Amino acid sequence: MGLTLAQKIIKNHLLSGNMQVGEEIGLKIDQTLTQDATGTMAYLEFETIGVDRVKTERSVAYIDHNTLQTGFENADDHRYIQSVAKKYGIYFSRPGNGICHQVHLERFSAPGKTLIGSDSHTPTGGGIGCLSFGAGGMDVAVAMGGGAYYITMPKMYKVNLTGKLKPFVTAKDVSLELLRLISVKGGVGAIIEWGGEGIKTLSVPERATITNMGTEVGATTSIFPSDEVTYEFLKAEGREGDYIPLASDDDAVYDKIIDINLSELKPLIACPHSPDNVVTVESLSSVKVDQVCIGSCTNSSLYDMLKVAVLLKGKTIDPSVSLSVSPGSKQVLRMLSESGALSDILASGARLLECACGPCIGMGFSPNSAGVSLRTFNRNFEGRSGTKDGKVYLVSPETAVASALTGYITSPEVLDNIEAIKAVKLPKKFLIDDSAILPPSPPEQAKNDVVLRGPNIKPFPEGAPLQDQINVNLTLKVGDNITTDHIMPAGAKILPYRSNIPYLSKFCFAVCDETFAERAIKAGSSIIIGGINYGQGSSREHAALVPLYLGVRAVVAKSFARIHIANLINAGIIPLTFDNPEDYDTLNMDDKLVLTNVFDGLKSGAMYLVNTVTGAKIKLNCAFTERQQQILKAGGLLKYTKTIN
Ligand code: MIC
Ligand code: SF4
């Protein structure tokens, strides 16, 4: 039986386990990336592991999330990351150089390699045939230290593309179509491979848009084959030496095949507050728009920006709309500027923002009260924009421009620049300027490098060794599809404190219940009850470390998202599922509960939650590998790593 493309890369990197679906496998990791919002914690964790230099082929630290430096906090954190990077063998991409995924795709991702990043959109690298995973900071720290990265061997899904996109229909619409077809849970437990004749018509940046948004269907990762298109892109980046061809075998077996005919797609839009709430753009044409944002790791490539410039050229945006444009990298910005395209964008009335995440993570450009914001981003979770009642819609850059010009949600199909759009092509050679990527010190010099720590860096909480019986208060009960943006919000006010867990803890679950943090502290030891797909979205381990700090010992949900469940285990919080989902309804806030059979349950897969008032006994399930059992017993991954080193 032949292998799929992902199975081939896994096989080449397999350190432990069998490639049987559902089994835990350990992978050798070639490259890592971090961004600043998760990076400080990841490097603090890395330092506690105690190795002199990263053991990966390439590790890069990016500063892209929180670039505003509104106070000393961020500036200090960035300086810390820069100094750690220099000392330990990590490349440092300076603030302003671009969004981690865009820059990594341009300069470092390579076909056939493995990459993990402390950011859930790391699968962007799948656009170039690199097997890339989003992971918690601790997992990245361990990989930098030479340890394996553990995942559950995924199922293999294939999306078979036929046809060719019509003008004004884009890679973003392909992603939205997949979300419409399979929902935010449809890819859970699977790697999505993109194939079929249709892929030949998609450039690497378009492929990267698609693998980037594979995160939104919950997939472990997504990947495209490496072919002539990949070669052309690498050559244009001066990296043809990184090229290897890669494809699945003809007789590879997939667990599911989804067909999408590119020729039949229409411009699509995801409505508030979920990326899978997808309808056609046409169907919303009477909705007034207040704000439009173009950029983010999903849609900020040169290809996207050139199309935006062509559509805006000679036109002015509607006076009622505020339009922002953030190019994904310095390379994109410089090429826009040198080609004159930037001038067309600016002349239209657009505001140019830094090459960074910006509005995507609520760092400025929040919509007005109850405002409608059209964004080319990948997430539209409630409150993420920084405006609690803001209504965020996800669209392609083309739809974004058409709507900014008219002031209403507008399909780009009505625009008259069809020939100009068809003429937009990627250049044969990109402008290569790595001056903002600082190399680390050579090993002999690194010994004398000093790590610079500011007062915003507070120690991170560590879990306590497990007990067999844990008394807990039910301090929070939430519904389905709780995102990490609910658990640990981001945004301009909070993001500067990503290395200060005690301060961050005040905002934990504030979107759902502002009293949670205070009640959890008072309770001392607590449990959270959740619904389906608990913890979807970001890779931020803060969504586990902050609850740990607040005394959360276990989370019981109907099901969990992949990265979050790993982060809970790494933090030493026990993730459990209901044996009978109806038991969810019998639990109430403030119930005093006892989690029993913990030690035996880790092995046997069954623990119990006893309600001390009613005496009811609820069966809970878990399926921990031997390694995960040891991590939980030790009180988290770092403590466990120290015991085995
Ligand atoms: C996001 O898009 O939610 C983020 C911000 O990039 C996160 C990382 C973080 O919370 O720092 C992610 O996707 O993992
Ligand atoms: Fe940055 Fe947004 Fe991409 Fe996250 S999704 S990495 S915040 S641009």
Image (spheres, rainbow, N blue to C red):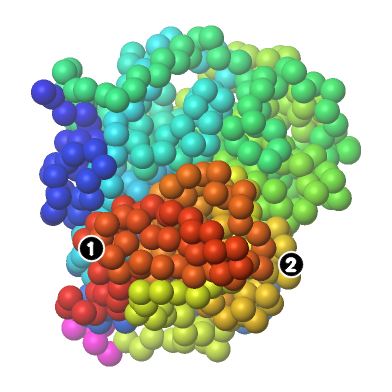
Residues rendered magenta in the picture:
443-448
Specify the label residue 168 is tagged with.
Answer: none
Q: Residue furthest right?
A: 320
Image coords of residue 243 (percent x, y)? 21, 37
Q: Is residue 233 left or right of residue 265?
A: left
Give the quarter of the image for residue 529.
bottom right
Counting the numbered discs, the total is 2
What SS does tag 1 mark? helix
- Mark 2 or mark 1, earlier in chain: 2
Q: Is residue 67 left or right of residue 571?
A: right
Q: Residue at left 75%, top 18%?
A: 283
C-alpha gap between disc 2 and disc 1: 36 Å
Amino acid residing under circle 2: Glu
Q: Is residue 605 visible?
A: yes
| Above-or-below relation of 346 to 611 | above
The residue that label 2 is drawn on is 514
Q: Residue at left 15%, top 50%?
A: 17
| Above-or-below relation of 401 to 589 | above
The residue that label 1 is drawn on is 627
